Image (spheres, rainbow, N blue to C red):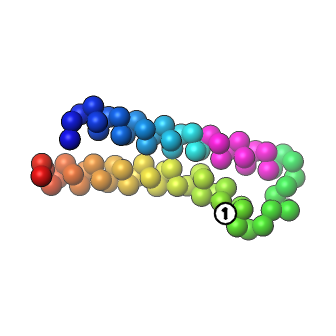
Amino acid sequence: MEPWVRATRRGGVILVGVISVVVSLALVSMVINHGAVSRLPTLQLLGLVMLLVLPVVTLGLLRLDQVTAREQGPR
């Protein structure tokens, strides 16, 4: 794979991850400051947690994919 394609893909994944974390932190801040935590169902609270956790997991899996591809060599 060409280096610029790899860099663009990695940059896009990192950008989406950062945006997701920022948006989820803003949502958590709004929920906590307005006292809505006690009124939200568990599923919606889990959704907020997943917005924080999934980008980190995605970046970890991207790194694992890169290491695996590097070990296997060119196809």
- In this picture, is 35 found above or below 1? below
Residue 9, image x, y percentages: 36, 40
Residue 23, image x, y percentages: 65, 42
Q: SS of the residue at dot 1?
A: helix
The quarter of the rendered structure image containing the N terminus is top left
Q: Residue at x 86, y 62 (%)?
A: 39
Q: Residue at x 72, y 46 (%)?
A: 27
State the count of labels.
Answer: 1
Does residue 75 appear to the left or right of 16 in the view shown?
A: left
Does residue 46 appear to the left or right of 9 in the view shown?
A: right
User: Which amino acid type is marked by label 1?
Assistant: Leu
Give the residue at mark 1: 46
Does residue 45 appear to the left or right of 3 in the view shown?
A: right
Q: Which contiguous range is marked in magenta?
A: 22-31
Quarter assignment of residue 72: bottom left
Residue 24, image x, y percentages: 65, 47
